[in-house]
Amino acid sequence: MTDTPAAGLARTVAVINGKGGVFKSSIVSSVGGLLAEAGWRVLLIDADIQGNLAEDLGLAEVTDEGRHQLDVIPSGLPLHPVTSGRERLDVVCGGELLEDLDAVMSGRQSRDPQWMHGLAKSIDAVQDDYDLVLIDCPPGFPILQTMALVASRYVVIPTRSDSGSRKGMRAVARRFEAARAYNPDLELLGVVRTGITKSAKRIRDEVRREIQDDLGGSAPVFQSVIRYAEGAAKTVRDLGKLPHELEPDIDRLERARLQRLGERKRREKLATKGGKRKADPSEEAEITLTPSLGGVAQDYAELTQEFLDLLTSAEEGVESA
Ligand SMILES: Nc1ncnc2c1ncn2[C@@H]1O[C@H](COP(=O)(O)OP(=O)(O)O)[C@@H](O)[C@H]1O
Ligand SMILES: [Mg+2]
């Protein structure tokens, strides 16, 4: 037991925005999954009440909804992660019981000046088992967010270009500054632009400028973006498989898609006998699915590479300082 509470753990990264729907969970699962495939030992911690990480990883049937976190974090006991079913990729699930954790830690605030180190302590005990820890942060719940930021060495902020996401980003920037009082080493690795059209360079540049305005002109912004691909994202969550894991199936899915398309055209011809038939939106979703999946997988591969490069230069900066 040391007097210095755990904070700013090496290679622990919080993925955070004060708004939901900016692809936080998708980024955590894909970047973590890709690095585990590349040989890293990776731990993913779902600190969100939504518990979406379990869905992305195909663990929706076995998640404990955050029960384990509720059991260990208030006493700073070691986390016992479970396997994601993939080599080198472990996970601590989140979910609705984190609401109870939030309440417990909130009650703690007045009598324990080190309450905000709870998660850091629980990770610290197992961090030697991993090369990287990624925390999927909740969009609200300041107590849970603060514990995640105090545990982390780096922060990644995904944002979409709408005003709500940018407001969420500014809220996180304030929380980031507050967390630095307990964790002075906390560093912004970069902002990731998500849900934008890959080809629209003008929009990408505009969003970059807006981010820099929002964060005071000096914000590092990832070159890589995650494109908007609703169908692909839905498949990932429905199947519990990550985009790069589905990639090998794309050819097969693509053939099935063309076959369906052919059959649909034939049915349409029979049904309308020359008149127009309205497309069923569910069929549309199905037929646009497979090409975008490959694109999304590629975006995550590029993001992961850039993440590694940034992490490496941040660590080299630390070593040479
Ligand atoms: N590339 C994408 N394009 C469109 N929708 C996506 C994409 N990635 C994820 N989604 C969907 O957007 C929603 C939010 O994604 P999620 O990763 O859960 O964000 P967050 O964790 O920030 O709330 C989910 O319904 C998810 O399926
Ligand atoms: Mg999420």
Image (spheres, rainbow, N blue to C red):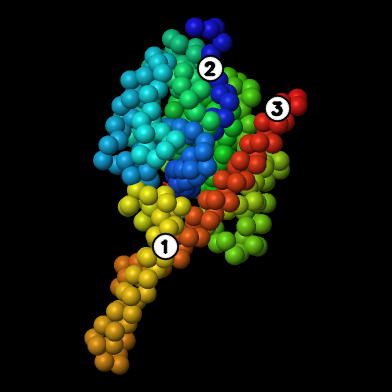
Quick one: quadrant of the C terminus? Answer: top right
Separation of disc 2 and disc 1 at Cα?
Answer: 44 Å
Q: Which residue is mark 3?
A: 318
- Which residue lies under the disc numbered 2? 6
Q: Amino acid at mark 1?
A: Ile
Horizontal side, residue 201 vs residue 75: left or right:
right
Q: Which mark is residue 250?
A: 1
Amino acid found under the numbered disc labelled 2: Ala
Q: Residue at x 39, y 60 (%)?
A: 249
Identity, as a three-letter code, of the amino acid under mark 3: Val
Residue extending farthest left: 271
Name the element at disc 1: helix
Quadrant assignment for ligand 2: top left
**Label 1 Cα crowd, 10 Å radius (few <14 / some 14-19 / many 20+):** some
Q: Residue at x 30, y 35 (%)?
A: 63
Which residue is at 69% across, 36% downward? 313
Q: Earlier in the sequence, mark 3 or mark 1?
A: 1
Q: Percent from the top left, x then y, of residue 291? A: 45, 66
Residue 242's disc number: none
Viewer-nearest of labels 3 and 1? 1
Q: Is residue 3 above or below residue 42?
A: above
